[in-house]
Image (cartoon, coloured by chain):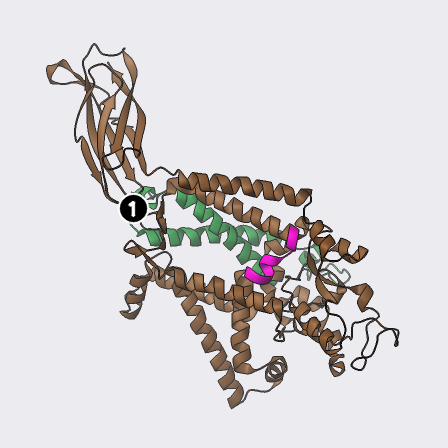
Amino acid sequence: MLRIMWVLWPSFVVAGIAEGIFFTVIDPQELYLFGEAVHLSKIATYSIGFLGFWAVCAASSMMTCFLQRSAAEVNKGVGVHLPPADNANG
Amino acid sequence: MASETPSRTQESRPSFVEESLYEVHKKVHPRAVSGIFATWRWALVWFTQLVYYGLCWLPWNGRQAVLFDLVERKFYIFGLVFWPQDVIFLAILLIISAYSLFLFTAVGGRLWCGYACPQTVYTEIFTWIEQKIEGERNARIKLDAAPMSGRKLWLRTAKYASWALLAFWTGFTFVGYFTPIKTVWESLWSLSLGPWETFWMIFYGAFTYLFAGHMREQVCKHMCPYARFQGVMFDPDTLTITYDTERGEPRGARKKGVDPKVIAKGDCVDCGICVQVCPTGIDIRDGLQYECIGCAACIDACDQVMEKMAYPKGLIRYSTEHAIESHWGWKEIIGHVIRPRVIIYSTILGAICLAFVWGIATKANLRVDVIRDRATLAREVEGGLIENVYRLHVINVSEAPHRYAVSVSGLPGIDMVGDRIIEVPAAGARSFSVQVRVPPESGKKGSNQIFFDVKSLADEKVAVHEKASFLQP
């Protein structure tokens, strides 16, 4: 649960900031998708933009979480016999 | 009170299990508290929520007073209209908020967390609902432990439904700041709400429900960045919720009215009420902890106990590290408020606030962008005159429609073809095509500087003098 929170929450906050800056500078009507002007309503563009930012940021957080695993956690169950893993970070 | 002593050990420090997997932690059932600081918190709950739920319904000049119109890309705040070009004001506002937070934290500790943070405010409201439906702390703990029954099912349904209703209204209000709330209200009843409005309403409502109903102190402990870095703004003269260890220890149960000196104990009767009222479930007697949101519930609770015991109040109180060490009173504490850190924060804050007010007061009501027509750089027209074509993008930032006079200057014999009087609607923008003509002998070959003047007919002060370049072949 804590890991899910670590992935979803910071990415949500950063996505909010990115959304604000991006759409202040760029009008959704100036955007092109595969060479064609975006036909979606502005609210839809903003919303999809936010969800997109969130997804990208979450992917980054997820990778950080993944790489943070200790050696003991990675080795668990692959035949290396170590003392019980220090699982303090979940 | 003494009978509740054993419960303290279970509730004092967060356990290892809680650190690793937050959902298996022992649920915190804060005991309701009354007192001066609880009253302050409720006053702020009322104030912030009246503003939040109410402001979006306030009309102003035939529109919503506060509306962040994303579709039109304009923010309306009472008489002011902000365009994307005004983003600097938003940036300054954020800096002001940050510095206010720094200043308040340096002086008074986590005042924001304890009284005004939405997480605190909504948790307070949701806990109040819970308490009205399920009863006080002990009744809630009993209900949690009890097997499912008709009564439990009914109480739970009533609680969750009330929470959901409030959360829905919160989500609805949120959307009402971005799309005119009366439209949202009407389309809600005619079931014609747009898909994205519906999405954001449910999204915001669901998160309110989750954060204030279920996660509560976990948000402060595991999600809030401010909780982690507030420590850097603290110094030994910062007011924090402090347990007076010297006065309180050794703690221990005793009969009412017993003089602590007689039984060789401190003033703390070890009733554990300070722990029971704590919304984050910590024991303030262990010292300052990052989990402490500074809500002062333990102060209110302890003061009531001290009163019953006929001991002086303030065993737990707002105090500073220095004050506790040196046995200072309020006079000395206040005397130490003014210190380099506070002076620096206040000076910067004051300067930025002044810049903000000055910026708003002198915000231009008219903006003109001159764009050269790139298709034809220069051409010869009838009478041998040389013509350049421009587009004037005129933005009327004010709240009233305006008529403007357009003129051009900068070269001998310069003149223009096109509308000399233009009209732009309130808070609107329009583009006009202007052909500028000069005699061929006027100016030098190549680029020449010219000026466009756009002046409001109603108010001479509303004028823009904009540079452009005229190309002589």
Secondary structure predominantly adopted by residues drawn in magenta:
helix
The answer to whether residue B207 is left or right of residue B438 is right
Residue B211 visible in the snapshot:
no
**Quadrant of the frame with the C terminus of chain B:** top left
Q: Residue furthest left?
A: B382
Residue B159 vs residue B457, the one in the foreground: B457
Say few, some or many: other residues with alpha carbon within 10 Å of mark 1 (under 14 / 14 to 19 / 20 or more): some
- Is B3 rendered above or below residue A31? below
Chain in green (letter): A
Residue at 62%, 81% in the rendered image? B141
Residue B42 visible in the snapshot:
yes
Residue at 52%, 41% in the rendered image? B352
Task: Tell me which amino acid carries mark 1.
Answer: Glu
Chain in brown (letter): B
Residue at 56%, 43% in the rendered image? B349
Residue B177 falls within the magenta-colored stretch: no
Q: Residue furthest bottom?
A: B150
- Span shown in magenta: B107-116
Q: Name the spot of residue B68 as percent of width and height, x first.
A: 37, 52
Residue at 67%, 56% in the rendered image? A74
- Which residue does the numbered mark 1 point to in the structure image? B399
Q: Name the spot of residue B115 as percent of width and height, x first.
A: 57, 62
